[in-house]
Image (spheres, helix red, strand yellow):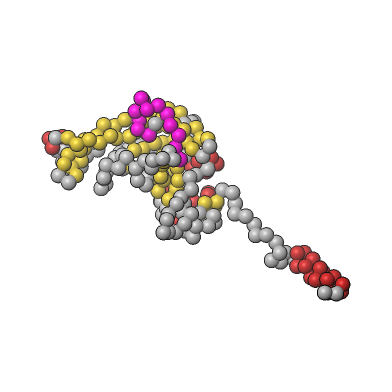
Amino acid sequence: MTKTSRIGLGLIAAACLAAGAAFAEPAPPAADNVPGSTGRLDVPFAKALRMMLNNDGGGGGIGYTTAGPVFTAPALTDSQLKAALPGNTIRRELAWAAYFDPDGTVEGWKRDWSKADMSKCPTPLGYDYEVEDGACYTAVKNVISGKYEIRNGQVCMPAYSGKPEDGRACYYIAFITAFAVIGDGKTVYGGGKDFVKGKVLESYTTAFNHAR
């Protein structure tokens, strides 16, 4: 290669860089983005949160990092938890509910179900009883109450069980499509839960499968 051609190539490269051509590295995704339905970090968390609270399906795939054959979902970060939890409720039918007050306290309940005599189930479905597959189940409602704090990508609060003897524990939370999922790194607690605006701790009944 001649000296002239080397100079020419250098001038071309300099011109391309000045024009912002393909030599430039692509901008990294925003740190607070979450995966969309393609698995890319292309959905701003503020948008994902708005969609979750509007119950519109989380954008058809909020929270998935892959689209199969293995599905995974990232836990929310500290900043995402701080944006999402205060002033809102996570709940599942007759199983569990928790409202995270902006003042740093959490209020809710957890039902423990057990098989009982059929006389305890006067109708097929009530708030603290249900007939399932011909068997009667009744529930004890445990109260969740105390302070919560967000650290290391977890929310630390009174135990999920609502039993005082279980003390406190820290939990990861993830958004998967239109649902919130809670786990401690070893166990996933029940199925997907509704994530709703404000304080909504009333029990509600639909088809129920005694999920925790």
**For the image shown, how many numbered marks are present on the structure?**
0
Rendered-image quadrant of the C terminus = top left
**Does 130 sit left or right of 15 as displayed?**
left
**Does 183 sit left or right of 78 as displayed?**
left
Residue 42 position within the rendered picture, expressed as x and y whole percent measured from the top left: 54, 56
Above/below status of 12 relative to 123: below
163, 58: nearer the viewer? 163
Residue sticking out furthest to the top? 165
Residue 87 position within the rendered picture, expressed as x and y whole percent measured from the top left: 46, 38
39, 43: nearer the viewer? 39
Q: Is residue 62 visible?
A: no
Residue 22 position within the rendered picture, expressed as x and y whole percent measured from the top left: 69, 66
> Is-magenta flag for residue 166?
yes
In this picture, which residue range is highlighted in magenta?
Answer: 160-172
> Is-magenta flag for residue 72?
no
Q: Residue at x 54, y 55 (%)?
A: 41
